[in-house]
Image (spheres, helix red, strand yellow):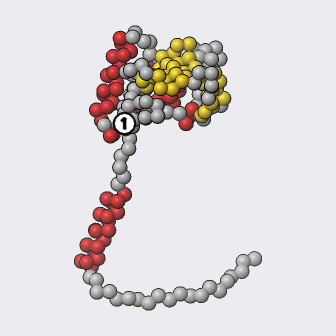
Amino acid sequence: MLKFVNLPVLFFKKVNLPINNKVMNRLLVFCCCVMLFTACKKVSDPAVINSNQKQIDDDIIDQYIRENNLKVVAATANDTSGVKAIVIKQGQVNTLYSLSSSVTVGYTGKQLTSGKIFAQTDSIHPSFKLGEALSGWKIGILKGQVNKGGIIRLIIPSRHGYGPYAQPGLGLPANAILDFTIEIFDVTN
């Protein structure tokens, strides 16, 4: 059964302000303008910060692939992401990937243009959710479809790596094109 509680009734006093409709309209327009300009935020999408960088990266990657006669996986050959996948070893176990897949890998990461190694796992094989990786890894591994036990090479344009942000801890300049060779040891869905 419902019980009703008596709450105190609040009364508000009407206040007459010397503001007419013209002043209110101006005040309303001013407030709307303030809200619009304060709602805008700085764009931090690497593709938008330097619109020319996409074309620069894509040209460098295409030239590198041609000069080295690399066979790119069909799903990444004309992909607008610019990420290129090259299967080095297919692997034996058919593997299904999703962004929530946990992958155990070994990898070597190089800067494409200099060949300088900036990351290497050696005998340590980290595991992580694919959805937590660089966007270039997500795109390349999902589209490259290398199996468990396989090795894939991903060439990643800067917009899907670290973008226009230098990575001093890794020794990478801004807009670095990345070249990863990744061995897939295990995949858990």
Secondary-structure class at tag 1: loop
Along the line of sight, the residue nearer the viewer: 144 or 59: 59
Quadrant in which the N terminus appears: bottom right
- Residue 107, visible in the rendered structure: yes
Residue 184 is situated, as x and y percent measured from the top left of the image, at 60, 21
Give the residue at x 35% y 18%.
62
- Which quadrant would residue 177 be assigned to in this image? top left
Q: Residue at x 31, y 59 (%)?
A: 37
As displayed, is residue 148 above or below residue 137? above
Q: Between residues 168 and 137, which one lies in front from this camera angle?
A: 168
Q: Is residue 75 visible?
A: no
Q: Callout 1, which amino acid?
A: Pro
Give the residue pinned by disc 1. Answer: 164
User: Which residue is at 67% across, 83% downward?
Assistant: 5
- Please state if 168 lies on the left or on the right of 51 as rendered: right
Q: Residue furthest right?
A: 1
Q: How many marks?
A: 1
Specify whether 6 is left or right of 27: right
Residue lying farthest top? 69
Whether residue 127 is situated above or below residue 11 in the rendered picture: above
Q: Residue 102, located in which quarter of the rendered image?
A: top right
Q: Within 10 angstroms of label 1, few (less than 14), some, or many (20 or more) residues?
A: some
- Image quadrant where residue 176 sits: top left
**Residue 97, image x, y percentages:** 59, 28
Q: Quadrant of the C terminus?
A: top right
State the image coordinates of residue 81 (x, y, percent, origin top left).
41, 29
Left or right of 134 in this view: 36: left
Q: Residue at x 42, y 24 (%)?
A: 111
Q: Could you tell me residue 130's position as x and y percent?
A: 57, 32
